[in-house]
Amino acid sequence: MNTKAKKDLPLGTTETYSTMHKWLQRALFVCLTCLVIEGAFTLPGIAIWMGWPTLSLQQICSELEKVRYSDDSRECIYPYPLFGPSEGAGQTTAKDVWGIQPKPLYRRIGFRDLVRFRDERLARQAAEKKKQTEAPDDGTQAPVAAPAP
Amino acid sequence: MSGSSTSDQDRKRKRAMIVFQIVIYSWILGTFLVQLYLKSISDW
Amino acid sequence: MTTLTKSAGFGGYDAHQIASQAAQRRADYWMISGTLLMGCAVLGLIGLPLFFRGIWLQSQAAKAGLTMRPTIVTLIGYLVIIDSALNSIGWTLDLFAHHTLINRVLTTGWGAMFDGGYFWHYNELWLGGAGAPGEKAWEISLIPVLFCARMAAAIGLLQMKRWGQQWLIVTCWMGMIVWFGYNTNMTIFADVRYSHITFPVWGWWLYDIWYITPFLSLPYLHTVNREIFSD
């Protein structure tokens, strides 16, 4: 009986554990394959989700920073000075509900939302600039304060 | 040891292994379910 | 290791051993190359077929009657190395390379999608990198202690050494503590980890559940016939 078992079973596996070992091996194959596929697609996947190639990696970095600290004036400094302080050290703009369980309030980033955030911001800034440059031509009238009470 | 494949010790070890696997997988599943519950009561 | 030896007279045993070792080495070359590529994450799709070719060579040699390492031992050994390598890449980036461009896209991008711990107040701590409660302590303790020890143990296991099996058992139990502790931390600070990210809860689980190697290795390592590992 022993010789038969040894012929059919892999080295080191006794009959008692043969089923368990078979299933463990299958699960290990699944884990390996999933880890590898996931590992291969993580970087390109995140880059595409975040807006590459419409945005360059540095632009993505900047957009992520603007979302993270809820501050449109944030820019991703690259290359970052080697022994400089952490880029976010001392920032005061990030939004949270503070308490024993801090709760972040940044915007959720859906598929290619960073491109949209950027376009919206640029449009907003362009509109503001236009208003500012147009205002002196029209005289002293400030566009926002125009409606009489 | 290799000769006693169906010994009492082996049977006990097998049962211990099965219990062990049930415990660890239920713990993992448990934390997952707790997190799903937390998700359902919050606005994540 | 000698159970499958087909005695072919005086010297037959030696010839069989030599042929087995050569076949094992040939299979291992493919699997090692595959593992090096897979451990780099991005190059994994090139590494996977190389690795599977090694597995196939190994099983063909075993079918031909040579004494080869069992498939499950091979899988556990290499998977532990890949698992540790992938974990270490992410955490080492976060720990030492937190201000590089690639890290600020990859890690914070991943954080914004799967785990807010890697997005929330990122690069604000004096140490840089993730600032989620407890996260840095896990990184600093696990990279040098757990992952280095596990890789060494996995290499010992692949060489069919007794110490490799024993140390892999030890480090897999450590891996169990990591899963329990890390998960509990995440559940307690779930607001930081899951608020306003793209895929709260199920995203992290779908991404990380494949790192469950220690759970699958332990039952095998405890029930395998220890005689196949040599001193």
Image (cartoon, coloured by chain):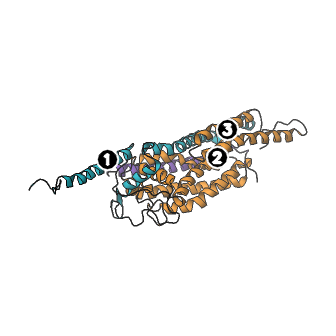
Chain colours: A cyan, B purple, C orange
> CA gap, disc 1 to disc 2?
44 Å
Question: Hey, what amino acid is under mark 3?
Answer: Ile
Question: Hey, what amino acid is under mark 2?
Answer: Leu
The residue identified by callout 2 is C36
Q: Image check: C96 left or right of A74?
A: right
Q: Image check: C46 left or right of C180?
A: right
Q: Quadrant of the N terminus of chain A?
A: top right
N-terminal of the pair, mark 3 or mark 2, is 2
Q: Is residue C86 visible?
A: yes
Q: Image check: C229 left or right of A86?
A: right
Name which quarter of the figure residue A99 lies in.
Answer: bottom left
Q: Chain of mark 1?
A: A
Question: Hey, what amino acid is under mark 1?
Answer: Glu
Q: Chain of mark 2?
A: C
> CA gap, disc 3 to disc 1?
53 Å
As displayed, is residue C184 above or below residue A85?
above
Q: Nearer the viewer, mark 3 or mark 2?
A: 2
The percent position of residue A143, horizontal first and vertical second, equals 17, 53
Disc assigned to residue C161: none
Q: Chain of mark 3?
A: C
Q: List the single residue furthest toward the right.
A: C10
The residue identified by callout 3 is C55
Secondary element under disc 2, as helix, strand or loop, is helix
Residues beneath discs 3 and 1 located on the same chain: no
Residues beneath discs 3 and 2 located on the same chain: yes
The percent position of residue C82, horizontal first and vertical second, equals 60, 48
